[in-house]
Amino acid sequence: MRSTMDRLRHSILYELMLLAICTPLFSYLLHEPVAKIGGFGLMLSLSAMAWNYLYNLGFDRSLMALGRPLSPRGLRLRLIHAALFEVGFMCLTIPAVMWWMNYGLWQALTLELAFILIVPVYTLIYNWGYDLTFPMPAGLAAGPGR
């Protein structure tokens, strides 16, 4: 399993890159000030960092409990990983969007649909690139008894 410091680096880089992409994009698309979108994005990023740490820790422990190796992770497992992360995080973000943006449920769901299209693809690419850039030591990647 990855160390706490590695997980922290993973989360911080993930959120910084996502903010850099989404803040100007959604400011333009929603005709909202960059400060409003950026502030909201920062709030969501901090929440996502906590969720990311807990989710990935639980996901890795689940793989280990099932006797599955932590690495390598193929496309199917990465798709499952990304989809489950987003479903869990949506439970937090829809009410937050409604409150911060003063949106109704349908507007918040529409905004979530945009994230559902963008973020899982970004997550898949980011995690794959992260694993290539910062690979786990061979002994840790194989899992228990391997």
Image (cartoon, rainbow, N blue to C red):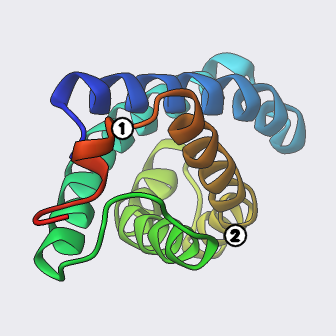
Instruction: Identify the residue under disc 1.
Output: 136
| On screen, residue 125 above or below 21 | below
Q: Amino acid at mark 2?
A: Leu
In the displayed structure image, the side of residue 26 where residue 16 appears, left or right: left
Q: Residue furthest front?
A: 146
Image quarter for residue 2? top left
Image quarter for residue 119? bottom right
Q: Picture coordinates of residue 11 (x, y %)?
A: 39, 32
**Count of labels shown?**
2
In the displayed structure image, the side of residue 21 where residue 42 appears, left or right: left
Q: Which residue lies at the image location 57% right of the left edge and 67% below the top edge? A: 104
In the displayed structure image, the side of residue 127 where residue 6 appears, left or right: left
Q: Give the label on residue 113, or none.
A: 2
Q: For numbered disc 1, what is the local secondary structure?
A: loop
Q: Picture coordinates of residue 120 (x, y %)?
A: 63, 61
Residue in front for this viewpoint, 61 or 137: 137
Specify which label sits upstream in the sequence, 1 or 2.
2
Q: Picture coordinates of residue 71 (x, y %)?
A: 40, 57
Q: Residues within 10 Å of mark 1 (few under 14, many from 20)?
A: some
Q: Amino acid at mark 1?
A: Met
Q: Picture coordinates of residue 40 (x, y %)?
A: 51, 32
| On screen, residue 47 above or below 105 | above
Q: Which residue lies at the image location 59% right of the left edge and 58% below the top edge? A: 103
